Amino acid sequence: QVQLVESGGGLVQPGESLRLSCAASGSLFSINAMGWYRQAPGNQRELVARITSGGRTNYADSVKGRFTISRDNAKNTVYLQMNSMNPEDTAVYYCNAAILELKRKNESDYWGPGTQVIVSS
């Protein structure tokens, strides 16, 4: 089995920074793309940032220039550095990864349980 566990959420004031982490564990053979999504109350879940196994990244327009996604393949961990945060960044943030498990033929999509981020003065 595979687990994704996020950490680093919390309450920050506008203009402040926060760093999220997500570690994958379990019967991992390889991890392809990893990403962060978020869902605010009443909204659909949306892509925030994504990074391939080779390090190629893409971002939602709303976070470009403020958020940075990175990964440590040795630790099976993906990070999201969030700077210059504003109240519109308030949401539950979910980690996502495309993982090939040991003894499996095809990749599957996995999700973490989510971590709450609140930006408020």
Image: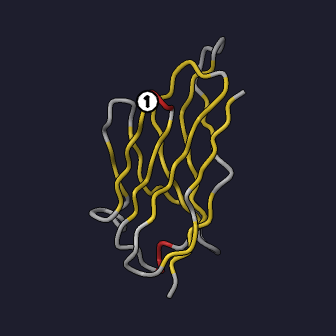
101 or 42: nearer the viewer? 101
In what element is the residue under mark 1? helix
Residue at the image point whose x is 40% and y is 68% from the top:
17
Percent across and percent down for residue 53 are 39, 30
Residue at the image point whose x is 63% and y is 31% from the top:
25
Quarter occupied by residue 103: top right
Percent across and percent down for residue 119 are 51, 78
**Type of colouring:** secondary structure
Percent across and percent down for residue 83 are 36, 67
> Which residue lies under the disc numbered 1?
73
Q: For the view shown, which residue lies furthest in the top direction?
A: 103
Label 1 environment density (alpha carbons within 10 Å; few <14, some 14–19, many ≥20): some
Q: Reply above or below: 13 against 94.
A: below
In the picture, measured across the screen, residue 82 lies left or right of residue 43, that is: left
Question: Identity of the amino acid at label 1?
Answer: Asn
Q: Reply above or below: 82 against 54.
A: below
Q: For the view shown, which residue lies furthest in the right direction?
A: 1
